[in-house]
Amino acid sequence: GGRCGPRPGKGAEGPASAPSCYRCIECNREARELYRDYSHGVLKITICKSCQKPVDKYIEYDPVIILINAILCKAQAYRHILFNTKINIHGKLCVFCLLCEAYLRWWQLQDSSQSTAPDDLIRYTREWDFYRMFAIASLEQTAFFIGIFAFLWLERPRTAKKKPNFFLLLKALLLSSYGKLLLIPAVIWEHDYTPLCLKLIKVFVLTSNSQAIRVILNINRMVSLLAVLSGSLLESAMVYFFQRVEWDVSSDCAIYKSQDL
């Protein structure tokens, strides 16, 4: 015998007495433990009874390797992060990503506007514009998530055997939106190819969101892509609404289009 559970120092869940909440990263079956610690640091990785492969090989990997595999959108890395580790940075990451997106919109808005107003009025206006961009970015992201949840709820009878955990899905979507952090470097290192980089970042974020949905709900790739597309359509409808009320949202329609810099 020996102790079982996730490897210490990897940010994973608690001891063996905890409820079975781990998943095999290969076949997505539930597992009671990730490894067994016999003594003196001698670990034996648990073998999945379903696929006869290690339940989670990433518990012995360096975090940098895990991050690289996540960037490559490997389902095994996503299962390790979402099911077999205890990561609670999704709220802070969401706020920081929204700040990055708001800064990009604010930067483009200030770059395209010229004013002859006094300096103190300009500073006040620019500060208010940043808050406005943050609020609009938050509303658009909320519309994106609502579109995804609505599609999955309507599709649930045909794709899911049990009621999906929408809280866990929301956490996965927030974590998989980390690609938005690349918006700031793309703006700082301004180049002729910056518009193309922004488009690629958008595609990467949507691809990551699709993979997160697929991993959490264990559904096929086409359904997850349709869910992301539904969210994007509702987000576009929100952008159209803001444009109709004559708000300069500087959203995807403006941010990711080609322009001369």
Image (tube, helix red, strand yellow):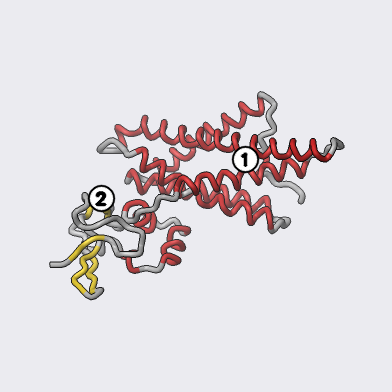
Tell me where residue 189 sits by quadrant.
Answer: bottom right
Task: Please provide percent x and percent y for residue 54.
Answer: 26, 64
Task: Please provide percent x and percent y for residue 85.
Answer: 34, 56
Residue at the limit of the structure toward the left, as seen here: 1
Q: Secondary structure at mark 2?
A: loop
Q: Which residue is mark 1?
A: 252
Residue for point 21% across, 60% down: 48
Name the foreground residue: 152 vs 90: 90
Going from N to C along the chain, the mark reached first, 1 or 2, is 2
Which quadrant does the N terminus fall into? bottom left
Residue for point 57% across, 51% down: 201
Task: Please provide percent x and percent y for residue 104.
Answer: 66, 46
With respect to residue 8, does 180 lie above or below? above
Name the foreground residue: 36 vs 221: 36
Residue for point 38% across, 42% down: 169
Q: Which residue is mark 2?
A: 21
Amino acid under disc 1:
Asp
Amino acid under disc 2:
Cys
Label 1, label 2: how far apart the Cα atoms are? 38 Å
